[in-house]
């Protein structure tokens, strides 16, 4: 099921980050995927937005994998099936499904 316009707007607002690098990667994600973003993927993106900016950037740049995060709650949040799916799409060099 695709995410509706209202849900997409709220999600974009939720995804605003404090680090420019995160914002650029997230903006690129939306440019590539917003027309086909599912409710499941929106949940995964929301899960990832629970992370600190530094943890998120480490994941996006492949410096760490979710299981390597030091905080157990962050590790659990970043390891949901939905978050893992979206993480693959968010990382630089990811292709459209």
Image (tube, rainbow, N blue to C red):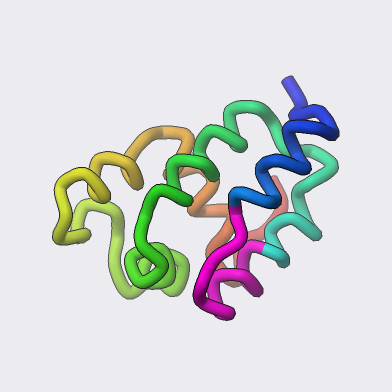
Where residue 30 sits in the image (x, y, percent)? 74, 55
Q: Is residue 6 left or right of residue 46?
A: right
Going 51% across and 53% down the picture, which residue do you hit?
88
Given residues 47 and 9, the one toward you in this image is 9
Q: Quadrant of residue 83?
A: top left
Q: Which residues are magenta?
A: 15-26
Residue with the most extreme bottom position: 20
Q: Is residue 68 left or right of residue 41?
A: left
Given residues 49 and 87, the one toward you in this image is 49
Where residue 24 sits in the image (x, y, percent)? 65, 74
Residue with the most extreme top position: 1
Where residue 60 sits in the image (x, y, percent)? 46, 67
Q: Which part of the image, by quadrant, shows the N terminus?
A: top right
Q: Quadrant of residue 2?
A: top right
Q: Say if the magenta span includes residue 21.
A: yes
Going 72% across and 66% down the picture, which residue do you hit?
28
Given residues 97 and 9, the one toward you in this image is 9
Going 81% across and 28% down the picture, which residue do you hit?
4
Where residue 90 sits in the image (x, y, percent)? 57, 59
Identify whether 82 is placed above or below 50: above
Identify whether 18 is placed above or below 81: below
Q: Say if the magenta span includes residue 86.
A: no
Q: Is residue 91 left or right of residue 26?
A: left
Q: Which part of the image, by quadrant, shows the C terminus?
A: top right
Given residues 88 and 16, the one toward you in this image is 16
Q: How many marks?
A: 0
Q: Quadrant of residue 65?
A: bottom left
């Amino acid at each position: 099921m695709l995410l509706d316009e209202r849900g997409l707007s709220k999600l974009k607002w939720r995804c605003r980050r404090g680090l420019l690098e995160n914002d650029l990667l997230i903006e690129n994600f939306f440019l590539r995927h917003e027309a086909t973003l599912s409710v499941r993927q929106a949940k995964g993106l929301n899960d990832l937005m629970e992370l600190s900016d530094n943890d998120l950037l480490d994941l996006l740049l492949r410096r760490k994998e979710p299981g390597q995060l030091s905080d157990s709650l962050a590790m659990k949040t970043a390891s949901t099936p939905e978050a893992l799916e979206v993480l693959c799409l968010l990382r630089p060099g990811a292709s459209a499904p």
